[in-house]
Image: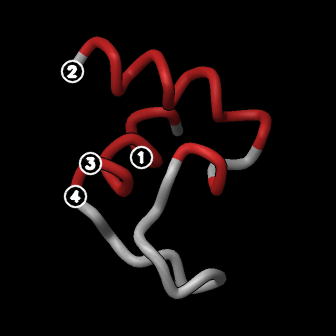
Amino acid sequence: MGVFYGNKIRSGEINPKTGAPWKLGDVPTLWRKKAEQWLKNN
């Protein structure tokens, strides 16, 4: 799931709940650390 959310952030996909591009703060807490690691490593 870290890759899933990392790809959303990297691609600039719009978060339907906020109407703005995804950012790390939008990622559920459970997956935030994995997404952050993925973004740093890729």
Residue displayed at 65% across by 83% down: 17
Q: Which residue is mark 2?
A: 42
Q: Which residue is mark 1?
A: 4
Q: Amino acid at mark 2?
A: Asn
Above or below for 29 versus 39: below
C-alpha gap between disc 4 and disc 1? 11 Å
Q: Which mark is residue 11?
A: 4
**Earlier-in-chain disc, 4 versus 1:** 1
Residue displayed at 64% across by 56% down: 26
Element assignment for label 3: helix
C-alpha gap between disc 1 and disc 2? 13 Å
C-alpha gap between disc 2 and disc 4? 13 Å
Above or below for 23 versus 40: below
**Earlier-in-chain disc, 1 versus 2:** 1
Residue displayed at 46% across by 62% down: 22
Q: Which residue is mark 3?
A: 10
Q: Residues within 10 Å of mark 1 (few under 14, many from 20)?
A: few
Q: Tell me, what colour scheme is on the image? A: secondary structure
Q: Please report contact status of discs 1 and 2: CB closer than 8 Å, yes or no.
A: no
The answer to whether 20 appears left or right of 29 in the picture is left
- Res 14 quadrant in image: bottom left
Element assignment for label 2: loop
